[in-house]
Image (cartoon, rainbow, N blue to C red):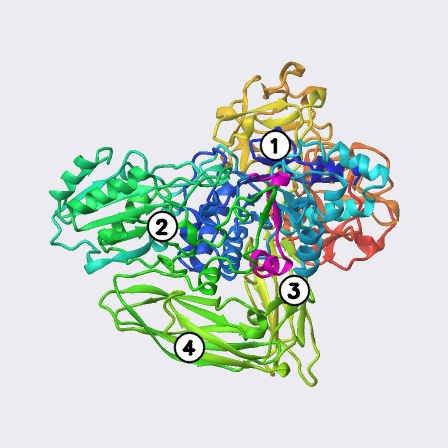
Amino acid sequence: MTTAQKVTLATGAGGSSYVGFTPAIGSLCIPAMNLEDGPAGVADGMTGVTQLPAPVDVASTWDTAAEQSYGQVIGAEEAAKGTTVDLGPTINIDRDPRWGRAFESVGEDPYLNGQLGAANIRGVQSTGVMAQVKHLAVYNQETNRNTPSDNAVISNRAMQEIYLPAFQDAVQQGAASSVMCSYSTVNGTYACQNPYLLNTVLRQQFGFSGFVTSDWGATHATAASANSGLNQDMPGNDGFYGAALQNAVASGSVSLATLNSLTSGILTEMFAFGQFDKSPVGSPAQTATSAANQSAATQIAEEGTVLLKNSGNLLPLASATKSIAVIGADASTSPQTDGGGSAGVNSSGTVTPLQGITSRAASSGVTVAYNNGSSNSSAASLAASSGAAVVFVSDFESEGGDLGSIDLPAAENSLVSAVAAANPNTVVVLNTGSAVTMPWLSSVKGVLEAWYPGQGDGTAIASLLFGDTNPSGHLPVTFPTSLSQVPAHTAAQWPGTNGNVQYSEGVNVGYRWYDANNLTPMFPFGFGLSYTSFSFSNLHIGTLPAGGAATVTATVTNTGSRAGADVAQLYVTDPAASGEPPKQLEGFARVNLQPGASQTVSFPLTQRNLQYYNATSDAWATSTGSYGIAVGDSGGNLPLTGTLSVTSAQLGQPLTVTAPGAQEGQAGTAVSVQLAAKDTTAGQTPSFSATGLPAGTSISAAGLITGTPTAEGTSTVTVKAQDAAGASASTSFIWTVAPAGSAVANPLVGFGGLCLDLSSDNNADGSKVDVYTCNGTNGQEWTEQSDGTVRAAGKCLDVKAAGTANGTLVDLYTCNGTGAQVWQHQSNGSLLNPSSGKCLVDPNSSTATGTQVQITTCDGSAAQSWVAPAGSGSAPGSGGQVTGYQGLCLDVAGASTVDKTKVDVYTCNGTAAQQWTVSGQTLQALGKCLDVNAAGTANGTLVDLYTCNGTGAQVWQHQSNGALLNPASGKCLDDTGMSTTPGTQVQIWSCTGAANQSWTLP
């Protein structure tokens, strides 16, 4: 790669439909990278997508399975839009409820943020889309962001214990492909040029091997950023990378070794996700939403809604309630279903609360009346005449600005009070992004925090109100009684003074602050009610083995009359010597129970769960002594308590596992990966196990992964090693299985250097295919398949209406196996459509961008020549010799085009019989394909030339050792007996790696 090409990968570019983009480099077969928000679904104004519940909503499920499902929906819809990198999840700590992006993050606890963030990443990346976790680090307010006036003055201890652990989990458990650095200035240095964050912590401490992208506009220097490990500058128009980075390399302020390292981080992840083996699919115009995705979104909204109050068991609304007043604009004309900024997502069909409640009430014979709440008196009048009143109130949050207070708008508080005075059976539904005050709390019987529930808003809330779904959400943030209670309650702490934001509360963030200062919040962290009840019993605390886990178990019982779910939570109290907050979350488990049923929950506690960051030594440490263990279902309800004793002999990590790095290959290709572990305990040999392995593979107790992957896809593999003494260690990595017979995507360059182009990167059926300035977008990435099709964005180059006349237009259409979609690349570069007998042409040798291509009589002119860039390795249309053993050439005997003509080795002579083109995974000469005779599989089966027919007998894969593998037979093309006699017919033979099986392609 040239320096310019490496810099291209590092620098965002314009000209695409995505919020971030680096163009394809055709000569190197490097595909485009399309980056798209975001953390709550496909954002940035794209349509045809599912508006999911806000991330804080799914966080309130405390359910890693729900979080992973959420990520899978995001990833699948991003993939449908042609995205390669999803800019999410957001896992920053919610330091203060005034933060404008609180709704798009997880919560206030590093353990919760880390576990749920890693699950989200695994979900996104299971779809083959890379997840970019954000924002590293100490990004907790919008006020003065991306300026020196947002300088976070913070201790290493607070960073290590509160603001960084979730990123460690994202890397080590989620195997995140990439990380976005933040807008923050941290202790005087911008995050995107902060060596402590990007190198010391991320790469050295966490072992991150992926790439770091700047937040948009967060790059503020060239050499300082590159030398600190910023791989990619977005959106790339700030002048710090691009030409400036090339100049920095030339001057020596950025070494070539550093640039190589930055480039390697990007390419490694692209390879890991199979982007060099998979054809680009999807486009911004493609519909991504589906009934299944919308149903999943609604289910998550239901599961994440938190029941905060239910006096007198008013909820669920009983059959005795014959009429319901639905009040508030938020219930109908202005539903607050999502937040703003890069987490704002368009809805593909919102169900309002009024619609949902009305629809559900009809099946129960309940009447529903609506008032928009613009008049307190009219709203109160309706409430007074109804059996129950449900008031919807909201507060909007968005990236780019913080809230001035944590109070709802005064008019909404007044409305609730008026309605509650008129009807004692009043329920309030909150649609907020974080904690708010509730001055009317004592006056209402029910409160539900529904967050920003996405487009299934009305369906979800109706199901909860009527008891079809039992509320089970738990708060991921503390709800204070007032703003004066919050940890960052001084101006110096929020939003800062004199350019500095003092993180003087240290590690006492969220519930840690309330506990440390004996403050009673309105609702504690982890709180959530249900329509049933639960009890906790049978606490058992195991022993901590060195390098292993102490297992804590407890029994959760549903003591009520309804099926429901609770979240068991485990908190640890450190010995006083550690100087830690009174308690810290170190485990949680969601349980679903029928009435009267019980379930044992299990929590593994490792040394990491007991550590504290020693400010004096600037390193992690673990105290010996007694650790308090408490289990319950919120920070304010912990009925089970016990003690874990730890001695120095129980500390240390005797067992380690070496990460093997990402794995990638094609389905049907055998694999063998040996995991390595080191155990310093005498006499111990670890045994291996794994989760997430591709179908068709397995791991032995000795750590050898073998088998043949059978299905394409991407998974997060976690390998665990454990010895008989109880020590264990694990590593997680990405494994992608690409489709068998994958073809390389490349631009096809035509007359005047213009590229064959899918207009506007729109893959709707019938979209025009034109010529356009080469720009490296997915709309110009074409793959020539073994079945003769030429594809872009997952669809086929198509002769419109299967026409045969000169001038018939060519478009893109769903692949359908017809002759209108079959093309044969000729030695002169033309693309012949055999069905019509015509060639693809740039009409009138046009150099006007946007000119739609056609078919016309083949004439060999430059307007009919379509070739891949030199050096691309696939070079369709750019014929050349295939040289083999002792410099002989692969040759069509007698230059005959008769089917079954023998293919031999012959003295290289430059004739057409020796001009081969790579088209997809076929090798073509004289318009026909290199073919295994009669699709044989035995050693010695002869190889000939035959009409291209899309069978496995004509598929060849060039291996790194030069061999040409025919996957259908599992054999390699072989110069028989290492012959140097011209005219010796080639054959297939078991692959040996010998010189007579090495072929150099054009």
What is the span of residues highlighted in magenta in the rendered image?
144-173
Q: Is residue 504 or residue 421 the one in the foreground?
A: 504
What numbered label is drawn on residue 823?
Answer: 1
Q: Between label 1 and label 4, give the one nearer the viewer.
A: 4
Residue at 30% in and 56% down: 307
- CA distance for labels 1 and 4: 72 Å
Residue at 38% in and 43% down: 454
Dot 2 or dot 1: first in sequence order is 2
What numbered label is drawn on residue 301?
Answer: 2
What numbered label is drawn on residue 443?
Answer: none
Q: Is residue 584 or residue 431 the one in the foreground?
A: 584
- Mark 4 residue element: strand
Q: Between label 4 and label 2, give the one nearer the viewer.
A: 4
Q: In which quadrant will I find the N terminus?
A: top right
- The reply to whether callout 4 and callout 2 are in contact (CB within 8 Å) is no
What numbered label is drawn on residue 615?
Answer: 3
- The reply to whether callout 1 and callout 4 are in contact (CB within 8 Å) is no
Mark 4 belongs to which amino acid? Thr
- CA distance for labels 1 and 3: 68 Å
Q: Is residue 413 magenta?
A: no
- Mark 1 residue element: loop
Dot 3 or dot 4: first in sequence order is 3
Q: Between label 2 and label 1, give the one nearer the viewer.
A: 2
Q: Is residue 129 or residue 626 the one in the foreground?
A: 626
Question: Pointer 4: what residue?
Answer: 641
Residue at 70% in and 36% down: 25
Image coordinates for residue 949, horizontal then vertical, percent: 60, 40
Q: Quadrant of residue 529?
A: bottom left
Q: Between label 3 and label 2, give the one nearer the viewer.
A: 3
